[in-house]
Image (cartoon, rainbow, N blue to C red):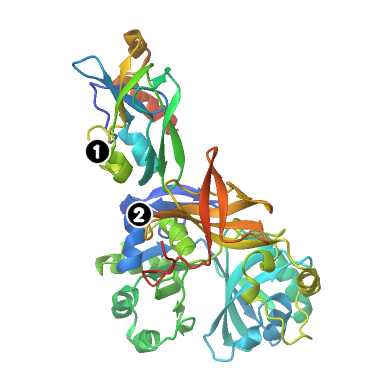
Amino acid sequence: MSNVPVELKYAKTHEYARTNDDGSVTVGISDSAQDQLGDMVFIELPEVGQTVAAGEACAVVESVKAASDVYAPVGGEIVEVNEALVDSPETVNQDAYGEGWLFRLQPEDVSEMAALMDGDAYEVFLASEAH
Amino acid sequence: MNKQTPLYEEHLADGGKLVDFAGWEMPINYGSQIEEHNTVRQDAGMFDVSHMTVVDLTGERTREFLRHLLANNVDRLKDSGKALYSCMLNEDGGVIDDLIVYFLRDDFFRMVVNAGTHDKDLAWLQKQAAAFDVTVTERPELAMIAVQGPKAREKTLPLLSDTVRDAAGELKPFFGVFDGDWFIARTGYTGEDGFEIVLPAAEAVAFWRQLRDAGVRPTGLGARDTLRLEAGMNLYGSDMDESISPLEAALGWTVAWEPAERDFIGRAALEKQRAQGTTQKLVGLLLEGKGVLRNHQKVVTEGEGEGEITSGSFSPTLQRAIAFARVPKATGDTCQVDVRGKLLTARVVKPPFVRNGEAQIEL
């Protein structure tokens, strides 16, 4: 039922991380997370050039229901943010893994990716949280 | 184990996301709260409000009892079927609950109270009714469906029985009419036209399906909250409770001071508060910039002190954050709200924000 692409990595705080060909990492929130939060109405993005540590709160997604921090799944420098979301936050609901990405960062230590869950592990994690 | 309404299975079938609400398993949305909200503003949506408590009050002295029980005056109800919104106060003038009461006959009134206050309301009603020989009868075997929106009445009327269709179509706002065990009222909690329909639980599923087939969209409690907030309607437990009087909750208009000799519960305390003056007031807020106002955020009024948001959300109609806030009495045209550590400017406005699909506030 849940949409969890196997090629991505996931944090326990429901961010996904996609490694791009250039070594940068695209971050967003999982489809399950957007579904839980409901209709997005406001997104606060980090600054390009800002350095974040793994687990550091660096963005906010606000739905009709609640505001929720977004944590960097790995540490690094923010190299791009998805400005389109400022005017169309609902894109996160419509396409969490595609057009609804939040920011891209250049990881400082790629080994941090290994600490994240793969798709199968995230599915199990979601199932355990549901109970 | 949470309680389920007769429509529980329908909510699951409709894709409803169920949450605990006052001990009931209720749909918060069926996918998109904003789409549901907009459908009620532009077309028609339906809400399962069977968790609310229907109480019938019977006995020769029922009107006299209600004159004593309620801060609003049931003597304003002269025509059968007419409804009245009122607070039920404790002796200190605090709000035990807000409710709607329908006058049916002099020995029969019907009341609809909140789900979250069920137990204390029933206990209070029983206690106060004894002296008037009024019988308090809860009606848990009844379900309630609210159909709201500019097209709610035209979509609902063809589904009602032949015996009541004409009468229901001719109902003036804030009136209700019986049809056997069914009770159809032109009331609501959204700022739109529509009906609230009380019906036997056993008939609720069939009626819900008929409404859905007629193009009425299932709408969850999430949209119900943003709709009532836009409409400038208070929510018990958020905007007022037993520690807050109607005068501090922008509900002064529901207190009937005249005739002066009507001795309703809480009157002495309210008169004292009115004479001394209140220190706080409940106002509407419109956030000037981006961000979302939320319950319990701190409000700062320069030079006057602090207040708190009692109900805050994003207004789908205005596309801006709106709120009710309890603030120092002297608060003027603007204030600041602590939104996640940042002080943002909000404009103080007079609700409603939206009525009958139209913005009432200049952005």
Residue drawn at 71 percent across, 68 percent down: B89
Q: Which residue is mark 1?
A: A95
Residue B117 visible in this rendered orientation of the protein = yes
Who is closer to the viewer here, A1 or B174?
A: B174
Vertical order, B23 against B143 (above or below): above
Where the C terminus of chain B falls, by quadrant?
bottom left
Circle 2: is it few (<14), some (14-19), or many (20+) Cα within 10 Å? many
Q: Residues within 10 Å of mark 1 (few under 14, many from 20)?
A: some
According to the image, label 2 marks what residue? B34
Q: Is residue B49 left or right of residue A97?
A: right
Residue toward you, B224 or A125: B224
Q: Measured along the vertical axis of the image, is residue B105 above or below residue A43?
A: below
Residue B182 picture location, percent across and down: 44, 78
Where residue B5 sits: x, y (%)?
A: 46, 58
Chain letter for the residue marked with disc 1 in the picture: A
Q: Amino acid at mark 1?
A: Asp
Q: Kindly state the secondary structure of the residue where label 1 is placed.
A: loop
Q: What x and y, as percent, mark residue B79?
A: 55, 91
Q: Which residue ends up furthest to the left in the rendered image?
A: A21
Quarter of the image where one finds residue B43: bottom left
**In this image, B290 relative to B94: left or right?**
left
Q: Residue at x 42, y 17 (%)?
A: A54
Q: Can you say whether B318 is above or below B342 in the image? A: below
Q: Is residue A79 left or right of residue B343?
A: left
Residue sitting farthest toward the bottom: B78
Identify residue type, mark 2: Ile
| Pointer 2 chain | B
Q: Residue at x 80, y 68 (%)?
A: B276
Q: Is residue A123 visible?
A: no
Res. A75 image quadrant:
top left
For the residues labelled 2 and 1, say whether their Cβ atoms are less than 8 Å apart. Answer: no
